[in-house]
Image (spheres, coloured by chain):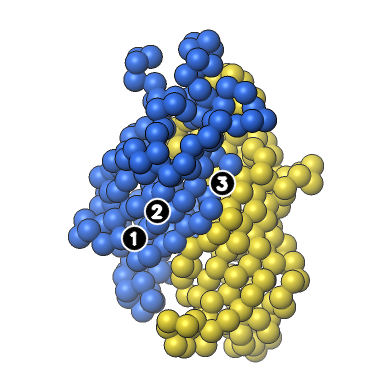
Amino acid sequence: MEDFVLSFEDFTVGRRFPLGPMAMPREAVIAFAEEFDAQPMHLDEEAGKASLLGGLAASGWHTNAAVMRMMFESYIGHSTSQGSPGIDHLAWKRPVMAGDTLSGHSIVQESRPLKSRPGLGIVRFRNEIENQSGELVCLSEFSVIFRMRDESRGAA
Amino acid sequence: MRMIELYPIGQRIVLGDLLFTPEDIVRFASQFDPQPFHMDAEKARDTMFGGLCASGWHTCAGWMKMMVAFHKAEARRFAAEGIAPPRMGPSPGFNDLKWLKPVFAGDTVTYSQTPLTSRASQSRPGLIINTGLAEGVNQKGEPVLRFESSVIEYA
């Protein structure tokens, strides 16, 4: 397994990690909305049609959580990730409709060691997420902290 | 009425409290963010966090949950008081989101929202873009989450 672990050093500028595909089925859209974002356009087809979204659409926070899962499967889940300090900006460019399938890329923008925390480095990514028609649905830029390779082997 | 008339710029609105139980943390993480520090208290000890803590996306979803609950209560108040409710639309996104401290199992987060700006959309006539400072503070008074939210309002 160790060979598959991605450390800070592996996140070189320009490297692209494919995301998805991941389906956003109707039941999942409604279940997420019932717990966290119970607005009519995320719960009901007719209410969605009457809104700016044009149909039953996923909560933007559901889309973000689904993208997190795609990132986990692509690289975070076999990396030395120590979590994220935050998101510089995120834009929901287009609604994610119930039944859509999401895919995309995480692209490394920048990477530097953390001076304050030896053995750790911070990587800035850009996420480009699209639907099954190739339409951009979400753009974001954010950072993740990773352990460096020597540190991770020392801890193993 | 417009949002800006109902909720003045700079005036903080307390939305409500949300308890993050270990069960809720693990349930959210299993579905969306199964990193060891969100899944297992033992494994979390060896990480930067030092204990089981909620996915940052879970703490954001908690803000949305409290926001929706607040506006539902407000809709009832408007109906009772004969106030025309603001016509709110979807959000175009957010900026400068910071997970300032981990939200650990057993923490209670108090969420709030402070209106920052309200302006007519340049690209879409008839729409207003409202921005606000979204915040979450734990039971010790420590800020755990902060971001600049935005939401569309129909003029």
Q: Nearer the viewer, mark 2 or mark 3?
A: 3
Q: Chain of mark 3?
A: A
Residue B14 at x, y = what percent? 72, 62
Q: Which residue is mark 1?
A: A137
Q: Chain of mark 1?
A: A
Q: CA distance from mark 2 to mark 3?
A: 17 Å
Residue B103 at x, y = what percent? 64, 39
Q: CA distance from mark 1 to mark 3?
A: 20 Å
Instruction: Return the residue nearer the eye: A38 or B103.
Output: B103
State which tag comes first along the sequence, 1 or 3: 3
Q: Colour of chain A?
A: blue
Amino acid type of the residue that numbered disc 3 sits on in the rendered structure? Gly
Looking at the image, the residue that sits furthest to the left is A133
Residue B111: image quadrant is: bottom right
Identify the chain drawn in yellow: B
Residue A44, above or below B106: below
Residue A106, above or below A39: above
Q: Residue at x 54, y 12 (%)?
A: A155
Residue A63 is labelled as 2
State which tag comes first along the sequence, 2 or 3: 2
| Mark 1 crowdedness (10 Å alpha carbons): few <14, some 14-19, many ≥20 | many
Residue B11 at x, y = what percent? 75, 71
State if disc 3 and disc 1 touch (CB < 8 Å).
Answer: no
Q: CA distance from mark 2 to mark 1?
A: 9 Å
Q: Residue at x 38, y 14 (%)?
A: A2
State if disc 1 and disc 2 touch (CB < 8 Å).
Answer: yes
